[in-house]
Structures are given as structure tokens and as C-alpha cells.
Amino acid sequence: MKSPVHRCRDVEHGRGQSTGGAGTTCLQAEQRIPISKDVITSSAASAMWFIRDACGIVCAIITWMLVLYAEFVVLLVMLLPSKNLTYSIVNGTLFNVLAFLALASHLRAMCTDPGAVPKGNATKEYIESLQLKPGQVVYKCPKCCSIKPERAHHCSVCKRCIRKMDHHCPWVNNCVGENNQKYFVLFTMYIALISLHCLVMVVFHFLYCFEDDWTKCSSFSPPATVILLILLCFEGLLFLIFTSVMFGTQVHSICSDETGIERLKGETGKWGKVPCWEAMQMAFGGPFSLSWCSPFAGLSCTRSPAEHTPLPQGDIIEEDVIEIPFT
């Protein structure tokens, strides 16, 4: 929640809005407009979400290609030529399960609405329908012309205001926000696990090939085998470091109840923070269970009918900061 000092800066930035009968420019924190999550996100809750950004689409394709390359090397270079059937079955099953969960988490993070605020709801009619009390203030985003709820930030790539936006990640071609942070955390966790698994298997395979004949430890020629294993080792080490750092950063953001962009802008500590365990339950959708590790939790094949009230139509207001006047 914004502090009074920050509010003064917003009001000054909003073309110097004059206040009502109260004669103050700086409002108390509890006067912040109480917009519910259902009202803000209902318009896009049932719609398919996909960002048409060339860079993000290319990065998402590269992500899948790297996982498929690891799949190719693990199965065809290391496991299938192995003489130990139990070793091949156990490691092949483990790797494929983790890879499947990683790609499923990536798909959910990419195609889930991160918490976008509906465009164009900054109208006089809509503000009047909220039935606000005199002295309360609403903020309009000048870029997407929407009523900006608390802790929402505008993404220049998604071209929307996103609730609890942490950052825009090109690797998932989407913002990481209130609704899809769980899937992004799972994606980084599973990529880190398969990267670690790849590195362990590469080490064991090198040791096995050194002890045995190189022509018998792989179905490829020795030079090709070495090149494929070195590339996989480099890929696994790079992504193990990157995704482990991202996983730790995301878990810390959830536990501290502050997003990356809030920390970057110095907006921390301006709202009522929730305890770490409660924040984890909110992010992962309930009390601790195996569903925390599943990217399919909450996924339904049936489409529920819309239960929200359509937003009132009207002209977009010009002011960026609107105070409900005293009567």
C-alpha cells in the first residue's frame, strides 16, 4: 500500500488534481479504493491468454527446443546404448516425468492470465457504479485507460496493468503475476531438477566410456558423442544456475510478500504484509499438498459461464487521479 508521501507524488504527477471539501491533497492509506479481485480480473478470467510478442515467442520456442535436445541426448546417446537395463529405465522414467512437468508448467505460465486489469474501465459510469465513499481516490493508468488497483503495474509488452506483477519473462512469453506465479516457480524448479539430473548422468556416462570402449558406449561415433555430451553439459550447467537463482528469488518474493518490481521501485513495506506460510498458500492455491507440485491443479476441461457484471460503458476520464468529492 502506498505511503502518504508516495500518494502526494502521484497526485502531483496527476496534473495537480485539486481536492474536495476536505482541503487535503495527501490521503490516508485506508482511503485507497477497495477494488475486489473478482471485479478487476473477471473480464479475462475465462478467455485464452497469449501474448503476441515476437521476442517472447522465439524465446519460448528456444526453451522447448533445448528441452527436446536434452531429451534426445539423454535417451539416444546415454540411456538406450547402456548395458544396464535397470539404470536406463529408472533414469529414463525420472527424466521424462520431470521434463513433462517442466514443459506443462511452462505452458501454464505462458497461457494463464497473470492478473490483467480490464482495459478501458476508467469511465465515469464505472466509477459511479463502485459506490465509493467521499474522499476516496481512484488511479487511472494513462497507458491502458484502466482503473489501477493496489500493487498493479503496467507492462509495456503485455500492454496491460498486471496485479502483483513481478516481472515480464520472455522465456515464458508472459508476465509473472498474481495468477501464474505458481506455474513459473514450478517451471524453474523442474528445469533446475532436469538440469541437475543431466549433469549427473553426463558424468557417469563419461566415466563409463573411459572405462569401456568408446565405440560401444554410444550409438554415435566417439567425436559426435563427445560433442553432444559437452553441449548438454554446458546447457545443463547454465540452466541449473539460472533457474536455481530464479526459483530462490521467486520463493523469497512470495515469502516476503513483495514483488521484484516493487523492490526495484522501492515500494516495499507500503501495504499490510501477510506471513510467509500464508503467502505461500495464497500463491499455490491452498494448504500444502501434492497439488503444489502439479501444474494441472485447478485445470478444468469444462468452461464455466461468466458470472460477472458487464462493465458500464462511457467515455474515458481524462484525469489520472480522481478523488470522490464531498457532498
Image (cartoon, rainbow, N blue to C red):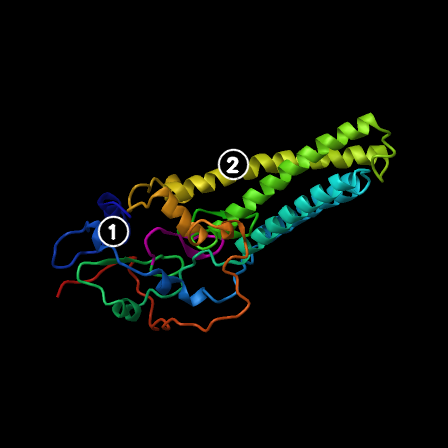
Task: Sort mark 2 into few (<14), some (14-19) or many (20+) by Cα contacts within 10 Å.
Answer: some
Q: Which portion, as a residue range, is magenta?
A: 148-163
State whether residue 303 is above or below residue 137.
below
- Residue 48 relative to residue 153: left or right: right
Q: Nearer the viewer, mark 2 or mark 1?
A: 2
The quarter in which the C terminus is drawn is bottom left
Residue 206 appears left or right of 241: right
User: Residue at horizontal 51%, vertical 46%?
Assistant: 185
- Give neighbour class at mark 1: few <14, some 14-19, many 20+ (Cα, 10 Å): many
Q: Which residue is mark 2?
A: 245
Which of the numbered marks, if any, corresponds to residue 34?
A: none
Q: CA distance from mark 2 to mark 1?
A: 37 Å
Residue lying at 41% horizontally and 49% vertically, measured from the top left: 281
Pick the front one: 249 or 9? 249
Q: Tell me if residue 169 can be seen.
A: no
Q: Which residue is mark 1?
A: 11
Q: Is residue 306 magenta?
A: no
Name the kind of residue labelled 2 in the image: Val
Task: Tell me if residue 137 comes above or below residue 85 in the rendering.
Answer: below
N-terminal-most mark, 2 or 1: 1
Which element carries disc 1, helix, strand or loop?
helix
x, y percent for residue 313: 35, 73
